[in-house]
């Protein structure tokens, strides 16, 4: 059987205030405090939920909690907002009853959060599916958008809703959401232009400046600095716990989910930016000829940017701030506006622009979330509206808010009494009239069409002549002086003349929640809520996509001279429509209470909570519920809970549940007037009776617990004894089995030992006999072998003596050679041709073989090494080999060139654009291109030249310009002279009579002398029609310079520069080259 908990189980304080005993305001507050201290923030008054704001996160809204409260009776579990949401949803789904959930309380009490919890619970328990999930997501995501544009930070709440919201969620016959409709009431648009100290403007302004990208701000002509805008308060611009930048991204995402197009989002943000710019417009007076002052815009930069955002001509809006046109029938009169009137017009435009933008947003959301089907729908309404407000300074806004709460209290009392009466009639119990305070008289004082305060305010606003707040107050004092809920010192009622707590410019109304003092100042202006027609027409002329929708009255073709309805009239009509809507639905109430003004957890201010309890009428609510029967419960549930109190009903009652409850109460001797039998429920009049039953049940449960413990302990001991007995039998059986097995094992082991000894003795005896027989056979064989050997040796002794020495020698030599080759295999040197190591010779007679093997191995590994060469690398090594043959041990510069690769082209003649012409002159492939120094015979100094070598010629060219200085065929070259020293000088000598010899020989210098001479030598000898170029290596040689022969002499010494080769002319016949000592 499923075990169910109850509202009455493990109760902290009293979970349902109807059961509070004794009932007083002090015990009511004490019970709320006790539950609040234990994080029990929800308490019932019958079916009404009281919600305390904990100002902290509690783990009571998880998915597990949703499943716990799903499809459970309202009183089955501890108080929770999910219980009310589940009761409302199941009534709508199963009984086809339209529901409404009314959430009331003052600012900061948690109304908005409560509405979110209700909607999230309904979204969690209803059906699933792609379309259903889309609708649920759109309904939930409408909240961030409306919060951004309709919520603001106040001194009481960091996220206070500054408008009333009523959402109708529409469901199909299965209980799945298919759409919704949102209605908004009385946006506090005055906040756009003015905020009290410690408060902020609406969230969207701060979110836009904090979270928008730099490109978007530039497009909207905005700056991130809040101080740049007059409409934004600076003392509370940032709020702890609110991340405006992150919230802006959330709002953008929510608008996308709801269905806003990207251009629509941009249009909305442009209007928000235009309002900020509008607040920066300032005016200055300018005198006219007629003596009146006319307002002029001081700095037109903000006006210009605002007009650009709205797409309106600047002069049109500027004129609307300076002039006002009044139309009467066929006449138009234009008057100038002074500075004060201009500021009033500016603020009125800002308030109207924001208010109409908010209304457009609500309508646009409704278009997206409305149901797409015309089939009959079930509706659940959620009303999140401002609670009763009593401030130090109460004005027009507080007056109409409190009027709305009066109407809600009126409908609450009516619906509660009606619900009680319907339940009594349904259960067949006699209904008795309940005495309660009917606040209809207060509602009539405010809304009466003739003498009501709103009617007189409208009448005063429409009256020609001078109309002020004082004239309105005088009219109230005249008409309402005798009303018992109206107080004023200027009225005819003499009892208030000496009441100094009542100022002369104020009036006081005694609401159901207490007396509220209203200051009459501003009532007329706020009720008029005038926007000059010139401004409406200017806005209509704007090219912005939304302006014609927001200001339809500005259309010149549809000029309406009729005065627009006042704010009070519009709100009264909205409240009337709301009340009619609520009366058609089954109501569910959530009363939100704020525990302290510090917005801090764990603080409970008795006086503040008491004040809210009074104006929420919670005590009145409890008294209405307790006026008849305080507690009622279904017979089945009652019998299930209390059946253990009577022997006839315990443990099972076989008959009807109602008869079982009668037997139960008769057996407990409960007085007959304390209860009544309905058709399906038992009604208990006094909470004391219920607590008597609960106490009896607690005692009985303790006795039953003791009985259960006794029976359980007896059962446990018997079970333990039987288990021990059974275990002892099993242990004995196992032990006897083990003992017999062990005995059998010992006997078997003993038999095996005896058998093994006997078999061993027999085997050893047989072994001895066989060994003796075998030894005899071996002895006979040995004797025979020795005898046959003696005979053979005797016959072959003469042959053995003649050939034994030679065979032993050959065998020995063979073994030595085998050992030599195996040792050589293990100690072979590496495969590198330059590795000169070789294993040592082990025997002298192998000296020739050892050397020959070394030579053959070296030739073999050289061949292996050469087989790895590419053609290019082969040519390079051939050049290196040729250089070795020419210069090794002959030229001191040669060793340093061995490690340098012969690159050939050192000036990148094919890639350098400067030498492209020079490259084209070369007929054959360029074998070598390098920069050399051509030595001047006059002074011994060198001039840089490009040295090109091809297969047929060599070319000298200027390094800077690439101009050819000399081109010599290789056929004309006879020899090359170089020194033995560490220098780069070489002389190119030409054949006598050759054309190239006319200018004389060339004396050149290069760091790559070895490579140049080698390539010259190889190129000269490569052709069959040319003789080999001779290479002379000497420290003194002759060079033919035109007609003169000059001796070039190389000496070792220290040049003047200290680090290089120096060439110096000694006389006409001698050039001396100083080479540094090695």
Image (tube, rainbow, N blue to C red):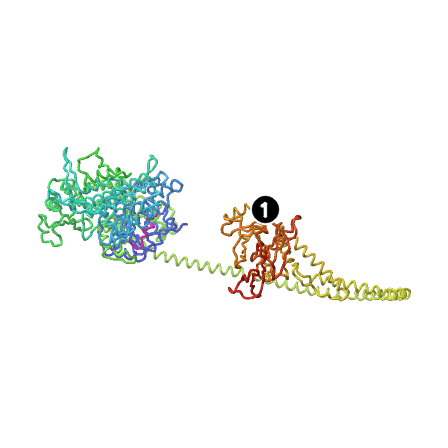
Q: Residue 885: horizontal and vertical position, in percent?
A: 65, 58
Rendered view: 387 above or below 718: above
For the residue carrying disc 1, how many other residues have a C-alpha within 10 Å: few (<14), some (14-19), or many (20+)?
few
**Mark 1 falls on what kind of element?**
loop
Q: Is residue 1036 magenta?
A: no
The foreground one among 791 and 784 is 791
Q: Identify the residue position indicated by label 1 in the image.
A: 924
Rendered view: 1029 above or below 818: above
The reply, left or right, for residue 65 in relation to residue 459 is right
Q: Is residue 240 magenta?
A: yes
Quadrant location of the C terminus? Answer: bottom right
Q: Is residue 816 visible?
A: yes
Q: Which residues are magenta?
A: 238-249
Q: Residue 654: horizontal and vertical position, in percent?
A: 38, 47
Indicate the quadrant where residue 739 lies: bottom right
The foreground one among 216 and 62 is 216
Q: Is residue 691 visible?
A: no
Q: Residue 221: horizontal and vertical position, in percent?
A: 29, 46
- For the image, the number of numbered tags is 1
The reply, left or right, for residue 83 in relation to residue 943 is left
The foreground one among 339 and 374 is 339
| Residue sticking out furthest to the right | 795
The reply, left or right, for residue 245 in relation to residue 723 is left
The foreground one among 382 and 948 is 948
Q: Residue 887: horizontal and vertical position, in percent?
A: 63, 59
């Amino acid at each position: 059987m499923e075990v169910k908990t109850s509202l009455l189980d493990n109760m902290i304080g009293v979970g349902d205030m109807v059961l509070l005993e004794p009932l007083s305001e002090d015990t009511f507050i004490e019970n709320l405090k006790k539950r609040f201290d234990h994080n029990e923030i929800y308490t019932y008054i019958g079916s009404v939920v009281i919600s305390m704001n904990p100002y902290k996160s509690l783990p009571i809204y998880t998915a597990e909690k949703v499943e716990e409260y799903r499809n459970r009776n309202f009183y089955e579990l501890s108080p929770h907002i999910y219980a009310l949401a589940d009761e409302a949803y199941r009534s709508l789904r199963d009984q086809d009853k339209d529901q409404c959930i009314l959430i009331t309380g003052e600012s900061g009490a948690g109304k908005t959060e409560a509405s979110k919890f209700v909607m999230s619970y309904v979204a969690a328990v209803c059906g699933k599916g792609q379309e259903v999930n889309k609708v649920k997501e759109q309904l939930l995501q409408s909240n961030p958008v409306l919060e951004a544009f309709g919520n603001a930070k106040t001194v009481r709440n960091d996220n206070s809703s500054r408008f009333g919201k009523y959402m109708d969620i529409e469901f199909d016959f299965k209980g799945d959401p298919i759409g919704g409709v949102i209605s908004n009431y009385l946006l506090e648009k005055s906040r756009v232009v003015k905020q009290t100290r410690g408060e902020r403007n609406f969230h969207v302004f701060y979110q836009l400046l904090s979270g928008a990208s730099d490109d978007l701000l530039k497009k909207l002509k905005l700056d991130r600095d809040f101080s740049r805008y007059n409409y934004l308060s600076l003392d509370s611009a940032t709020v702890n716990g609110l991340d405006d930048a992150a919230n802006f991204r959330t709002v953008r995402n929510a608008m996308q989910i709801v269905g806003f197009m990207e251009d629509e989002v941009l249009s909305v943000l442009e209007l928000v930016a235009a309002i900020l710019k509008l607040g920066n417009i300032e005016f200055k007076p300018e005198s006219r000829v007629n003596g009146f002052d006319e307002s002029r815009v001081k700095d037109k930069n903000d006006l210009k940017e605002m007009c650009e955002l709205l797409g309106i001509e600047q002069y049109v809006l500027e004129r609307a701030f300076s002039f006002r046109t009044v139309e009467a029938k066929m006449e138009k009169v234009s008057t100038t506006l002074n500075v004060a009137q201009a500021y009033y017009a500016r603020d009125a435009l800002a308030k109207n622009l924001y208010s109409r933008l908010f209304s457009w947003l609500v309508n646009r959301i409704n278009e997206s979330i409305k149901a797409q089907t015309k089939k009959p729908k079930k509706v659940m309404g959620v009303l999140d509206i401002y609670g009763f407000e009593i401030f130090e300074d109460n004005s027009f806004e507080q007056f109409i808010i409190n009027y709305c709460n009066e109407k809600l209290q009126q409908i609450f009392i009516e619906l509660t009494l009606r619900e009680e009466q319907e339940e009594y009639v349904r259960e067949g119990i006699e209904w008795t009239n309940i005495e309660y305070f009917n606040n209809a008289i207060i509602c009539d004082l405010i809304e009466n069409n003739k003498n009501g305060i709103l009617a007189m305010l409208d009448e005063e606003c429409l009256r020609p002549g001078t109309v002020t707040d004082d004239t309105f107050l005088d009219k109230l004092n005249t008409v309402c002086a005798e009303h018992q809920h109206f107080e004023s010192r200027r009225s005819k009622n003499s009892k208030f003349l000496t009441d100094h707590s009542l100022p002369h410019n104020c009036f006081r109304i005694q609401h159901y929640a207490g007396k509220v003092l209203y200051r009459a100042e501003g009532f007329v202006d706020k009720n008029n809520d005038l926007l000059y027609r010139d401004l409406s027409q200017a806005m209509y002329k704007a090219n912005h996509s939304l302006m014609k929708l927001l200001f339809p009255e500005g259309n010149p073709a549809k000029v309406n001279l009729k005065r627009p309805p006042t704010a009070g009239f519009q709100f009264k009509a909205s409240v009337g429509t709301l009340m009619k809507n609520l009366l058609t639905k089954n109501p569910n109430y959530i009363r939100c209470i704020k525990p302290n003004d510090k917005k801090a957890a764990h603080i409970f201010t008795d006086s503040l909570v008491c004040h809210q309890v009074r104006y929420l009428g919670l005590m009145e609510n409890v008294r209405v519920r307790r006026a008849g029967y305080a507690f009622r419960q279904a017979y089945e549930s009652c019998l299930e809970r209390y059946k253990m109190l009577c022997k006839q009903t315990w443990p099972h009652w076989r008959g009807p549940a109602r008869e079982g409850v009668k037997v139960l109460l008769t057996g407990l001797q409960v007085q007959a007037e304390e209860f009544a039998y309905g058709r399906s429920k038992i009604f208990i009049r006094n909470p004391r009776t219920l607590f008597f039953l609960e106490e009896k049940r607690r005692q009985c449960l303790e006795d039953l617990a003791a009985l259960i413990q006794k029976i359980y302990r007896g059962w446990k001991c018997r079970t333990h004894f039987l288990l021990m007995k059974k275990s002892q039998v099993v242990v004995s059986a196992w032990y006897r089995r083990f003992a017999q097995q062990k005995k059998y094992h010992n006997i078997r082991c003993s038999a095996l030992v005896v058998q093994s000894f006997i078999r061993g003795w027999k085997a050893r005896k047989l072994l001895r006999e066989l060994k003796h027989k075998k030894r005899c056979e071996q002895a006979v064989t040995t004797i025979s072998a020795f005898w046959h050997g003696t005979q053979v040796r005797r016959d072959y002794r003469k042959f053995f003596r003649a050939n034994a020495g030679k065979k032993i020698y050959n065998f020995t030599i063979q073994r030595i050679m085998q050992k030599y080759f195996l040792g050589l295999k293990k100690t072979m040197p590496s495969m590198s041709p330059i590795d000169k190591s070789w294993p040592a010779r082990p025997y002298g007679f192998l000296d020739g073989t050892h050397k020959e093997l070394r030579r053959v191995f070296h030739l073999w590994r050289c061949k292996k090494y050469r087989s790895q060469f590419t053609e290019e690398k082969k040519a390079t090594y051939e050049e290196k080999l040729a250089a070795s043959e020419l210069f090794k041990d002959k030229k001191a510069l040669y060793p340093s060139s061995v490690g340098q690769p012969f690159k050939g082209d050192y000036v990148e003649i094919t890639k350098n654009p400067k030498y492209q012409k020079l490259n084209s002159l070369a007929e054959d492939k360029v074998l070598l291109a390098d920069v050399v120094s051509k030595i001047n015979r006059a002074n011994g100094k060198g001039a840089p030249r490009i040295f090109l070598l091809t297969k047929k010629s060599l070319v000298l060219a200027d390094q800077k310009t690439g101009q050819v200085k000399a081109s010599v065929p290789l056929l004309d070259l006879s020899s090359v002279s170089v020194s033995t020293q560490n220098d780069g000088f070489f002389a190119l000598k030409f054949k006598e009579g050759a054309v190239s010899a006319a200018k004389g020989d060339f004396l050149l210098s290069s760091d790559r002398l070895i490579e140049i001479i080698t390539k010259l030598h190889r190129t000269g000898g490569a052709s069959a029609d040319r003789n080999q170029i001779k290479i002379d290596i000497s420290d003194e040689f002759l060079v033919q310079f035109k007609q003169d022969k000059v001796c070039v002499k190389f000496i070792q010494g220290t040049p003047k520069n200290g680090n290089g080769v120096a060439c110096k002319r000694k006389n006409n016949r001698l050039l001396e080259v100083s080479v540094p000592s090695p």
